[in-house]
Amino acid sequence: MRKTGILKLLCVSLLFSAVLYEAKADDNGAFSGYAPYTIYGVGDLFSGGSAYNMTMGGVGIASRNNRYINSLNPAAVTARDSLAFMSDFSLYQNNKIFRQDSQYAVNNLVNINDIIISFPLFNHTAMMLGIKPYSSTGYNFSQYDVIPGMKGNVLHNYSEQGSLYQIFASFGVNLFKNLNLGAEYIHYTGNLKKNYTQTFSDAAAIGIDKTEESILSANTFKFGLQYEQSVVKKLKFVLGATYKMDAKLNGFVNTTEKNGSIVTRSVSDTLAYRSQPLILAAEKGIGLAVVYNKNFRAELDYSRSNWVNSGFGTLGVFSPTAAESVRLGFEYIPKPNDVRYYRNIIAYRAGAYFNKEYYSVNGQPVYARGLTFGVTLPVFQWYNGLTLGFEFGQRGSLKNSMVRETYFNFSLGINLFDIWFQQYRYE
């Protein structure tokens, strides 16, 4: 009965996620308002972690926890009970307020954060399969110009929406008891659709409608290691490191231009013949975690990726640069094995981060900083849980007519845990 109930819940979760994925994938980040930080490159980059990672400031490079799936380091897949089947499904809800001088714009969206399953293979080995977002773009803004003559005023409207997702498969192995190695194959896929319209106030004038849709894909690999070392009884340290190779974007760019209702240009170009290829930058990361008696864990992560030679070049005031991130997270469980008081088995988490984005604006770096909070509420038995998270942060500033983005984000995660392949002596 226990296994049947868990399987039913897993099937319902996956069905729900598939429906929501289909409904939201094309709307990721799309809103009415001015969001300049999604204009450049492939848009906003996601930290990539589950609700568990997000509630701890986005750390995970050195995280080894047999209760939750950690997809930020492929070596972490071996942190598990030997017969455990695990799955993770999470959603996020973003609320953003943009301000530039005296102008304001807002947006909100709901989308899938990850769908992941993890299971053992052979002795000391395990595997993880999943899908999660890599980036999203979404903006819609207008500009008026006054043109002398009969045509009168002209309205320029710019918009874009779309996402890149990463489908991945990870393999990990435990060596020499304390050393864990992992490798991950990543396939990027998605599309970005831009639109520009020119509309005249004079009805006799014919406007322009230009649509550019990029259908993109890429492949790469990510490698990771984690080393555990006990210091004294109940206290241990975990050192983690990751390296993700760069990825060359392939695909097509379909361009259509219209004057009124008449198509004046329709062309499809392949990215394979570009003199300067578009590259998703490689990323290096290192992390250190401290774990005490399964009650308390803390982690500090640092990562860096250089986008200078990514091929995206300069777009208006935007220029590629090197991205950096520092993340700090904490988790506390009063009494993990308490069977008397429910509050003692709740996982309480908090975190903070400081990011430097992969672009500059007018030569000025763009920084983001935030705080995260969350809890995991145990349900059923084993390590099944419901994770609730909250994030508050800011990106950019009001200096030099830049845009300041303030956001309040919520996350919801469901992690399922079950023991498979176990032969019971009694029914």
Image (cartoon, grey):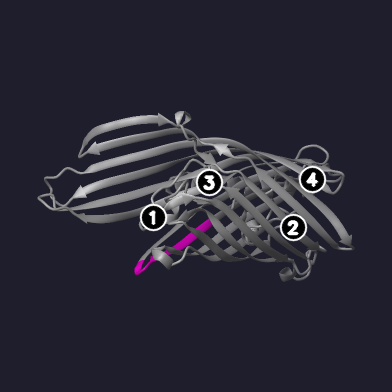
Say whether disc 3 or disc 4 marks the residue closer to the N-terminus: 4
What separation in Å lies between label 2 and label 1 (alpha carbons)? Answer: 38 Å
Q: Amino acid at mark 4?
A: Asn
Q: Report the amino acid beneath label 2.
A: Leu
Judging by the rendered image, the residue that carries numbered circle 1 is 31
Marks 3 and 1, the one that precedes in the sequence: 1
SS of the residue at dot 3? Answer: loop
Q: CA distance from mark 4 to mark 2?
A: 15 Å
Residue 37 position (above or below residue 117): below
Badge 3 or badge 2: first in the primary sequence: 2
The magenta stretch spans residue 101: yes
Residue range of the region highlighted in magenta in the rendering: 92-103
Looking at the image, which is closer to me, 214 or 167? 214
Q: Are marks 3 and 1 in contact (CB under 8 Å)?
A: no
- In percent of the image, x 17 and y 42: which residue is there? 206
Cα separation between marks 4 and 1: 43 Å
Task: Report the disc number at residue 308.
Answer: 3
* Res 288 label: 2
Indicate which disc, 4 or 2, sits on the residue closer to the N terminus.
Answer: 4
Q: Which residue is mark 4?
A: 180
Kindly report which numbered mark, 4 or 2, lies closer to the viewer in this rendering: 2
**Residue 220 placement (x, y as % from top left):** 61, 37
Comparing marks 4 and 1, which lies closer to the viewer? 4
Foreground mark, 2 or 1, reads 2
Residue 379 position in % (x across, y down)? 68, 59
Helix, strand or loop for disc 4: strand
User: Rounded to the nearest whole Å, what is the CA distance between mark 3 and mark 4?
Assistant: 32 Å
Asked where in the image residue 195 lies, by quadrant, the reply is top left
Foreground mark, 3 or 1? 3
Asked if marks 3 and 2 touch (Cβ < 8 Å), the reply is: no
Q: In the image as oriented, which residue stretches furthest toward the left?
A: 150
